[in-house]
Image: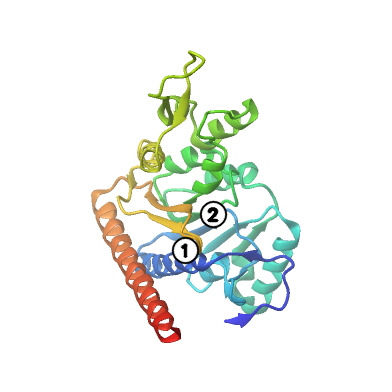
Amino acid sequence: MGKQTKKSGSNFGGEWTREKLTIINDYLGFYVTALSKQNVKLIYIDAFAGSGKTYLPNGDQVDGSAIISLQYDFDEYYFLEIDKERKDELEKIIKTRFPTKVDKVHIINDNCNNRLGDILNKLTIYQRGVMFLDPYALELDWSILLAASKKKILDIWYLFPLNALTRNLPKDKSYTEATSKKIDTILGTHDWEKALYKLDPQISLFDTEDYIRVNFEELVKYITNRLSSTFAYVSPRSRILKNSKNSPLFILYFMMTNNSYKAIGLGGKVVTQIFDKVDRIAKDVQNEDNTQTIHAL
């Protein structure tokens, strides 16, 4: 890992970023190994590819998900990035570090909602793939998830923007029409309004019906149920990624479009093992921090 020297064209994250990248890295290693003997072409899709590098709060520079994927033998890579500066930076890194893979890489400078559908339409039953969806905020249309779910050949990691959603869901239901339509697009339905807002049990002074947002657990459950209604399999183990203040930022979901019991069983088992590993790492880091704090007293 290197230290931060230049910020332009880069993504920034926290320790939660390290968790996310560890999980993606481990799964890609498993996936490529598991399918190496099968007569299929392997595809990797990164819908928010970024610049290929991420800076952590301590200044460390780490490889982003797109660069991590190039360490594994996929037959084709699709990297989508809407920001041209980030796209150009990613392209430079790939040409420098992975010159033998340049012909396998497709870098697309566009909104993923405009182009992912085209990529998904090209996939065939003779391919298998992993897709990583890591939106910056509320950018990903539900229609993309729906299209992906129908392919039956993709495993999907979706970093759902929980914090961005809750910021747009005021506790008193005072959102704008534009916000309402945006949430419809993200969740694929307007039913969220009835599910996420309930009548306030306290009597209003003005004899009006006031609504309040459901609690955190119910909100997460609703999101999970929406995904489960669309995909063949959604792992019961997801991971809530938090910032340094312990506030939830994202939920990392693992989903499969393949309805094979054997595939689901294997995928679910591996994901559980990966999450267990990350839990152990997080616990070790916490213990180390506590020890350092005690020594400092």
In what element is the residue under mark 1?
Answer: helix
The residue at the point 63 percent across, 59 percent down is 106
Which one is nearer the viewer's eye here, 238 or 115? Answer: 238
The residue at the point 39 percent across, 37 percent down is 222
Total labels drawn: 2
The residue that mark 1 highlights is 20
In what element is the residue under mark 2?
Answer: loop
**Residue 279 spot, x, y in % from top left:** 34, 67
In this rendering, position of residue 195 left or right of residue 51: left
The amino acid beneath tag 2 is Asp
The amino acid beneath tag 1 is Lys
Which sits earlier in the primary sequence, circle 2 or circle 1?
1
Compared with residue 118, is residue 73 higher up or lower down, i.e. above or below?
A: below
* Disc on res. 1: none
Gap between marks 2 and 1, in whole Å? Answer: 10 Å
The residue at the point 50 percent across, 34 percent down is 171
Compared with residue 13, is residue 60 higher up or lower down, i.e. above or below?
A: below
The residue at the point 29 percent across, 56 percent down is 268
Determine contact: label 2, label 1, CB under 8 Å: yes
Furthest residue in direction bottom, as rendered: 295
In this rendering, position of residue 129 left or right of residue 34: right
The residue that mark 2 highlights is 134
Q: Is residue 284 visible?
A: yes
Q: Is residue 161 visible?
A: no
Position of the C terminus by quadrant: bottom left
Is disc 2 surrounded by few (<14), some (14 to 19) or many (20+) residues within 10 Å? many
**Residue 59 spot, x, y in % from top left:** 62, 76
Position of the N terminus by quadrant: bottom right
